[in-house]
């Protein structure tokens, strides 16, 4: 899928943590390179986990395979950023606040992804929407940035550009494409879903995550909201990664937890990556042309 995105004119990213180990990532990089001669990158997200992966091994494998573009996210990325920059990589870091964005700039990142509250996965704990964050980024940041969270069409792309972003970052929308390596049933469920079909879990644990609102997610929230709340140990079996992977392999929407953003409300079909990106560019250009037409000459009075 990363190759399909890059071949379509975007920047495809391999997610390191979808691989069982660094050697599997190495093989995924080789396979992607066989499928595209365009640039692609690797995402390394550093987050709390039941069994933390060897992040350093993933980074070393990608560097050794010649990857030059990395997306980082999560907790304390400074050592990872330092290592990647020492090896000449371009580093894009995801942030949910302007404060964190400025810290990342000090670490030496080249590009920022500004993630609004609308995003899938971890939106931070401050609940700030993308429109405000992007406008603040234009005021405060002196490195390029892209917009992330809730984007899925050309109108959103045009809006992000108007707010100072140099592009957009999409995850949920790309899940509902022909090339996405997930079960067809899940793609079809995404088409039928709306922006109201996501929910936040782990709010009481200060580790908020936006996921699809299925029976497992609702049970996690129920346990969190009961008197006295819930400890992670009580939720562990519900949120295990193995269960989440079954969603994608077996097509059972309630098998486990799976991430989705409010971009669900924009998904109406399952195109190829090229069809999606070509359509988005046409839509964005149309919106920009419409905005230009709003300019009127001053009255000569």
Image: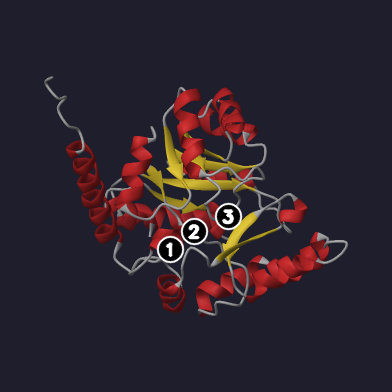
Q: Relative to residue 80, is residue 90 drawn left or right?
A: left
Percent of width and height locating residue 165: 39, 35
Q: Which mark is residue 262?
A: 2
Task: Evaluate if marks 1 and 2 touch, with contact meaning CB atoms under 8 Å apart.
Answer: yes
Picture quadrant where residue 173 is located: bottom left
Which of 198 and 17 lies nearest the eye of the viewer? 198
Q: Residue at x 50, y 24 (%)?
A: 140
Task: Give left or right: position of 278 versus 149.
Answer: left
Location of mark 1 (residue) = 265
User: Residue pushed farthest right?
Assistant: 228
131 over 178 or under it: above or below:
above
Above or below, 67 against 7 in this view is above
- Label drawn at residue 121: 3
Question: Which of the marked residues, 1 or 3, is nearer the chain's N terminus?
Answer: 3
Q: Residues within 10 Å of mark 2 (few under 14, many from 20)?
A: many
Relative depth, front residue between 300 and 177: 300
Q: Quadrant of the C terminus?
A: top left
Q: Quadrant of the N terminus?
A: bottom left
Q: Badge 1, how many Cα within 10 Å: few under 14, some, many 20+?
A: some
Tag 3 and tag 2, C-beta contact below 8 Å = no
Instruction: Where is residue 258? Give x, y as percent.
Output: 57, 66
Q: What is the CA distance from the residue labelled 1 to the residue labelled 3?
A: 17 Å
Residue depicted at x 82% and y 67%: 226
Report helix, strand or loop for mark 3: loop
């Amino acid at each position: 899928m990363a190759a399909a995105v890059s071949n379509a004119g975007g920047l495809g990213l391999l997610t390191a943590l979808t691989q069982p180990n660094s050697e599997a990532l190495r093989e995924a990089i080789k396979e992607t390179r066989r499928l595209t001669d365009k640039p692609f990158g690797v995402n390394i997200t550093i987050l709390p986990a039941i069994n933390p992966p060897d992040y350093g091994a993933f980074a070393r494998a990608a560097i050794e395979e010649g990857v030059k573009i990395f997306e980082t996210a999560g907790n304390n990325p400074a050592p990872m950023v330092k290592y990647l920059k020492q090896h000449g990589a371009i580093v894009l870091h995801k942030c949910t606040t302007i404060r964190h964005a400025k810290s990342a700039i000090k670490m030496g990142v080249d590009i920022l992804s500004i993630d609004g509250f609308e995003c899938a996965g971890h939106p931070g704990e401050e609940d700030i929407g993308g429109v405000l964050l992007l406008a603040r980024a234009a005021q405060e940041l002196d490195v390029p940035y892209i917009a992330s969270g809730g984007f899925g069409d050309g109108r959103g792309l045009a809006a992000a550009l108007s707010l100072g972003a140099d592009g957009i970052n999409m995850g949920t929308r790309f899940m509902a494409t022909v090339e996405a390596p997930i079960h067809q049933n899940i793609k079809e469920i995404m088409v039928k879903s709306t922006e109201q079909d996501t929910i936040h879990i782990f709010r009481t644990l200060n580790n908020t995550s936006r996921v699809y609102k299925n029976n497992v997610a609702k049970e996690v929230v129920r346990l969190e909201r009961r008197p006295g709340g819930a400890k992670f140990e009580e939720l562990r079996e519900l949120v295990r990664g193995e269960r989440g992977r079954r969603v994608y392999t077996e097509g059972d929407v309630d098998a486990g937890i799976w991430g989705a953003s409010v971009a669900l409300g924009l998904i109406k079909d399952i195109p190829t990556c090229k069809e999606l990106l070509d359509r988005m560019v046409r839509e964005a250009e149309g919106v920009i042309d419409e905005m230009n037409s709003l300019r009127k000459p001053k009255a000569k009075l």
